[in-house]
Image (cartoon, grey):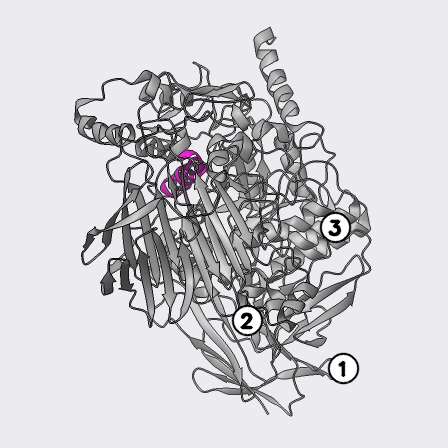
């Protein structure tokens, strides 16, 4: 029998969780507003005006790689050091730090894939007012103005971006507390004296405001041993009305102005059933913003891992369409402009300005800094079945069999926290999951996989090997007094490993080896949840900011914690296979660079129509900042969906990159066959559609890995000169060739889809009806409808023989869907590798270009140096927008010619060529005569 304490721990944890979640709704009082975050309130109180900072031009030094220049705050005489770099690839880096800080300030490590290569800067002109530098690209220049300090990036006569043009640069220098000054350590005495002298020589002491040296939120106290340390900088974007990015927020794709409310907040938090359409922080933070107009796309990457707030204002905000037309008629000369202000609690200013000029240039530039989306195993692009929790091995076996019984494919079944022995990760419940290898082998026999959760809070238990190892090695995060930091999470009292330490990450990775993680096999993958980190009894349900990671406070590294957990887990899965197998790891918390380590999802959503709708802009925003492998819990995590909502969510999720159904412990079971035969058939059909498109999804992820381009794309990415696309976030592109407009309204009988491109034509993939671009098309819908269109001018490979899992389809044949444009041409590609190893990096793949021109369809090898063979063949070619030929001739690589059978449907102009039967990896051409 369990002791009273053993019984009470889970009860208290559930009680805490319910208190935090309320009645299935977020308790906003658990999370700070800007006014409750003292540094945000302090910085936001500064209003635009003349900056107190002045550039000391006599201190300027220019080398081959950088320009350095001192700035002085004329109010307190504290000096800063400005570093300016021209980077390869049309980027500029600006760093600002204290010239002589009292102690080092945190600079974010491990996010950049390398130290960005530089190009020489050259001085074009200089006088007492400033200096003009060439950026080497056409007529691009940087103008550094001295008094007040200001930095403008210009091209020709156009200002692309201005820094500190509104005078909001702020840098709270480290200082000694007036009422507790102690003699500084000898090695820092000179710097401390310099900083202290700068303060004490002022005529007036700087005002000590509430929250500068200690701050309380609810019952939690933040000791702030380093005092105020915030940094802030404003950016002006002339000609810009549309800005995007800075996920994660449950908001529209186009970012809103924040003048009449809180700024957007970037601070990784465990928010139970988050609210929609507001700037509250969520689970992840990527401090990257894109700005776009018809002429140019630019980007700002603010490399800071502390709590950050982003203010946005615009001189056209609030103007109606009529008001803008009136300005035009009256000849108003006001140029649209968006102003952005970044405020971070600590660290330095380290900002990368990406100058595009195209959206795809921005993706390339950002990828060169932080890397690209990891190339996932093909199986992870299939369907994932999850809930909190599948009860035991028999439950897993039963659900697995249910998919076969109902002829629904899937690739992964998931286990949440209840599969462990008392929430001790890397273990199995000895009664419910007594023989995990038997369970995993049963899945493997069907070419299926499992994901098990491994969270980063470790149960404090002297009988738990993982805890004992971490404690004995000194790998736990420390509290401000030097002891191991402990907080409450699912196991009860828990320690938090310090993933910022390389030694800790290496040890964690080693725990995934098959001899350490007992019961694991090569078809078991991993899910990192709660890695913001979540601390149920901590401030804002997270770790205290004055907790200690080596030499740094948690406030400095907070937004990096989830990335480090994700990284260490991913490295563990790679190492367990000897570096051969590609991993799959899902994370909830993330930061810039997390794309290198796997997938993310949008967290604890709800079974509500608005949550279905918001999944689209949330994933689109992540794609814009490098994270392509995104999805939302199909059906909603909290609450219970109606059959209609569930079907519509499956229809939407099947066309988003990460496709997983998930549900809360307290919700009724909702496997796809539990809602009656009609709904089962609808869900089966859309999951099977997903599997037919796996070749296309897979090659898009290959390109994302190679280029950084998003898989799921906002329309404006492909149609950057069409303002009608700039705010669209109820539809999206997959690659550039599939347009999806999900049905997200309850009881909908029709939707209106915008088909972009004046010269484009779009083909309904279900009916093959052709529609012209640059129009709003009304589409009647039934419950079986999901409007999806293929772009004219594209060729998409599909596999129409759907089997129980993706691996079962490995050697199956392809059908090529060729959609002709108005010039009667089309192009596409076919990418094939083994689907699961890193051998593709050793040139073991097939990559072919497919193109149709002058009535000839051809397949050409675009990677002749690569070596791979496939058993798959081309069994069918479907040409949309075709004319009926007299004959179709296949010409193989050896010159052999043969006549092929075909059918032509004149009602929709579709030509179907049957059984050409050439190997998918060979050269061939097909002539229509």
Residue sitting nearer the eye, 330 or 453: 330
Q: Which mark is residue 573?
A: none
Q: On the image, numbered disc 1 is attached to which residue? A: 907
Q: Where is residue 344, by image quadrant? A: top left
Q: Are marks 1 and 3 in contact (CB under 8 Å)?
A: no
Residue appearing at x 55%, y 39% in the figure: 281
Judge from the rendering whether residue 350 lies leftward or rightward of residue 237; answer left or right.
Answer: left
Q: Secondary structure at mark 3?
A: helix
In the image, which residues are magenta? 557-579
Q: On the image, numbered disc 3 is attached to which residue? A: 647
Q: On the image, numbered disc 2 is attached to which residue? A: 721
Residue 715, x across and y down, in percent: 59, 64
Q: Residues within 10 Å of mark 1 (few under 14, many from 20)?
A: few
Task: Determine if the magenta segment contains residue 575.
Answer: yes
Rounded to the nearest angstrom, the CA distance separating label 1 from label 2 is 34 Å
Q: Residues within 10 Å of mark 3 (few under 14, many from 20)?
A: many
Q: Are marks 1 and 2 in contact (CB under 8 Å)?
A: no
């Amino acid at each position: 029998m369990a002791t009273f304490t053993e019984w009470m721990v889970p009860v208290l944890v559930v009680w805490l969780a319910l208190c935090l979640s309320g009645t299935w709704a977020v308790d906003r009082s658990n999370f700070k507003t800007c006014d409750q975050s003292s540094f945000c309130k302090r910085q936001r109180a500064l209003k635009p005006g003349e900056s107190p900072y002045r550039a000391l031009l006599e201190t300027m030094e220019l080398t081959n790689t950088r320009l350095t220049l001192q700035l002085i705050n004329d109010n307190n005489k504290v000096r800063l050091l400005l570093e300016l770099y021209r980077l390869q690839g049309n980027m500029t880096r600006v760093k600002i730090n204290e010239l002589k800080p009292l102690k080092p300030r945190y600079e974010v490590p491990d996010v950049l894939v390398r130290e960005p290569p530089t190009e020489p800067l050259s001085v074009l002109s200089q006088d007492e007012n400033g200096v003009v530098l060439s950026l080497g690209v056409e007529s691009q220049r940087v103008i550094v103005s001295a008094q007040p300090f200001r930095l403008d990036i210009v091209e020709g006569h156009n200002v692309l971006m201005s820094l500190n043009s509104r005078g909001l640069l702020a840098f709270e220098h480290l200082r000694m507390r007036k009422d507790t000054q102690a003699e500084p350590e000898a090695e820092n005495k000179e710097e401390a004296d310099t900083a202290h002298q700068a303060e004490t020589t002022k005529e007036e002491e700087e005002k000590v405001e509430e929250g500068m040296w200690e701050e309380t939120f609810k019952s939690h106290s933040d000791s702030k041993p380093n005092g105020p340390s915030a940094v802030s900088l404003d950016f002006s974007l002339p000609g810009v009305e549309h800005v995007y990015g800075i996920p994660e927020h449950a908001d529209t794709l186009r970012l809103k102005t924040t003048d009449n409310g809180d700024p957007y907040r970037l601070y990784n938090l465990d928010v139970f059933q988050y609210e929609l359409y507001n700037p509250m922080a969520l689970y992840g933070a990527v401090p990257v913003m894109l700005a776009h107009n018809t002429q140019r796309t630019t980007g700002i990457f603010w490399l800071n891992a502390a709590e950050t707030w982003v203010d946005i204002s615009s001189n056209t905000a609030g103007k109606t369409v009529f008001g803008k037309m009136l300005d035009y008629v009256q000849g108003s000369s006001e140029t649209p402009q968006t102003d952005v202000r970044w405020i971070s609690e600590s660290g330095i200013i380290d900002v990368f300005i990406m100058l595009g000029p195209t959206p795809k240039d921005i993706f390339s530039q950002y990828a060169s800094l932080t890397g690209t989306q990891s190339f996932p195993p093909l199986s992870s692009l299939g369907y994932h079945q999850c809930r909190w929790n599948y009860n035991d091995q028999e439950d897993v076996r039963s659900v697995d069999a249910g998919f076969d019984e109902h002829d629904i494919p899937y690739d992964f079944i998931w286990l949440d926290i209840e599969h462990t022995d008392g929430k001790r990760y890397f273990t199995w419940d000895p009664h419910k999951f007594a023989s995990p290898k038997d369970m995993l082998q049963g899945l493997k026999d069907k070419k299926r996989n499992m994901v098990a959760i491994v969270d980063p809070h470790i149960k404090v238990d002297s009988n738990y090997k993982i805890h004992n190892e971490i404690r004995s090695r000194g790998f736990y995060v420390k509290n401000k007094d030097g002891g191991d930091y402990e907080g409450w999470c699912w196991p009860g009292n828990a320690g938090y490993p310090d993933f910022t330490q390389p030694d800790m990450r290496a040890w964690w990775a080693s725990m995934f080896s098959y001899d350490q993680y007992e019961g694991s096999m090569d078809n078991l993958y991993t899910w990192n949840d709660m890695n913001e980190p979540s601390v149920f009894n901590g401030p804002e349900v997270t770790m205290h900011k004055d907790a200690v990671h080596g030499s740094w406070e948690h406030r400095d590294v907070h937004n990096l914690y989830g990335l480090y957990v994700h990284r260490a887990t991913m490295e563990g899965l790679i190492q367990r296979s000897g570096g051969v197998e590609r991993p799959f790891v899902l994370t909830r918390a993330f930061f810039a660079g997390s794309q290198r380590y796997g997938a993310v999802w949008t967290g604890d959503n709800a079974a509500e129509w608005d949550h279905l709708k918001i999944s689209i802009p949330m994933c689109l925003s992540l794609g814009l900042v490098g994270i392509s492998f995104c999805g939302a819990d199909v059906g909603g995590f909290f609450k219970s969906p109606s059959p209609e909502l569930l079907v519509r969510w499956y229809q939407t999720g099947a066309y988003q990159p990460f496709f997983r159904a998930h549900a809360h412990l307290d919700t009724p079971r909702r496997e796809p066959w539990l809602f009656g035969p009609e709904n089962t058939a609808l869900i089966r059909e859309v999951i099977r559609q997903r599997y037919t498109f796996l070749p296309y999804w897979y090659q898009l992820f290959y390109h994302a890995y190679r280029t950084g381009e998003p898989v799921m794309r906002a329309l404006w990415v492909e149609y950057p000169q069409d303002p009608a696309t700039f705010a669209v976030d109820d539809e999206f592109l997959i690659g550039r060739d599939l347009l999806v407009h999900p049905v997200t309204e309850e009881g909908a009988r029709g939707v209106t889809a915008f088909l972009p491109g004046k010269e484009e034509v779009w083909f309904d993939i279900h009916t093959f009806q052709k529609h012209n671009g640059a129009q709003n098309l009304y589409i009647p819908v039934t419950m079986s409808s999901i409007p999806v269109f293929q772009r004219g001018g594209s060729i998409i490979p599909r596999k129409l023989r759907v089997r129980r899992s993706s691996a079962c389809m490995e050697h199956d044949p392809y059908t090529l869907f060729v959609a002709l444009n108005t010039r009667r041409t089309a192009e596409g590609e076919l990418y094939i590798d083994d689907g699961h190893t890193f051998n593709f990096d050793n040139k073991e793949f097939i990559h072919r270009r497919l193109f149709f021109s002058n009535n000839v369809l051809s397949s050409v090898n675009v990677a002749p140096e690569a070596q791979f063979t496939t058993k798959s063949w081309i069994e069918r070619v479907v040409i949309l927008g075709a004319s009926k030929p007299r004959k179709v001739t296949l010409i193989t690589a050896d010159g052999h010619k043969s006549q092929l059978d075909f059918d032509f449907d004149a009602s929709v102009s579709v030509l179907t060529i049957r059984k050409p039967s050439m190997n998918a990896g060979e050269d061939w051409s097909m002539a229509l005569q």
